[in-house]
Image (spheres, rainbow, N blue to C red):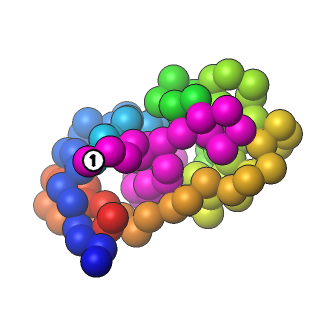
Amino acid sequence: MAEWIDACATDDIDEEDLIRFDHGDRTFAIYRSPNDEYFCTDGLCTHEQVHLEDGLVMDYVIECPKHNGQFDYRTGEAKRAPVCVNLGTYPVKVEGDRVFVEI
């Protein structure tokens, strides 16, 4: 059963950036958009399982730090080769100054 997990504070993430969030045996990436919205995806690239935490975030795209594949972090959609499998995405809500992820 899915539950809301307190992942981080809103100011832990700079605008157009991400942080790594580990929960149990899983890893996630939490993003802050240029419009001050928050999103969450799987933390590992679907191409070679490299963590996205060191990737470049620009507009609504995360670029994998290893082979420069790109995903739209709002939808998880694979946008540029070599990635061809979408990222999983997870609902996010903000309450006060905390970011919660439904896992």
Question: Is 10 displayed left or right of 17 in the figure?
Answer: left
Residue 81 vertical placement versus 54 (above, below): below
On the image, the x and y values in percent for residue 76 come to 62, 57
To which residue does mark 1 refer? 23
Q: Residues within 10 Å of mark 1 (few under 14, many from 20)?
A: few
Is residue 11 or residue 93 the one in the foreground?
93
> Callout 1, which amino acid?
His
Q: Which residues are magenta?
A: 24-49
Residue found 75% across the figure and 25% down from its top: 67
On the image, the x and y values in percent for residue 4 come to 23, 68
Where residue 46 sits, quadrant-wise, is top right
| Figure quadrant of the N terminus | bottom left
- Count of numbered circles on the image: 1
Question: Is residue 95 magenta-colored?
Answer: no
Is any atom of residue 15 visible in this view? no
Is any atom of residue 51 visible in this view? yes
Residue found 48% across the figure and 42% down from its top: 43
Residue found 18% across the figure and 65% down from its top: 95
Q: Residue furthest left?
A: 96
| Figure quadrant of the C terminus | bottom left
Residue 60 vertical placement versus 17 (above, below): below
Question: Is residue 38 magenta-colored?
Answer: yes
On the image, the x and y values in percent for residue 87 come to 61, 54
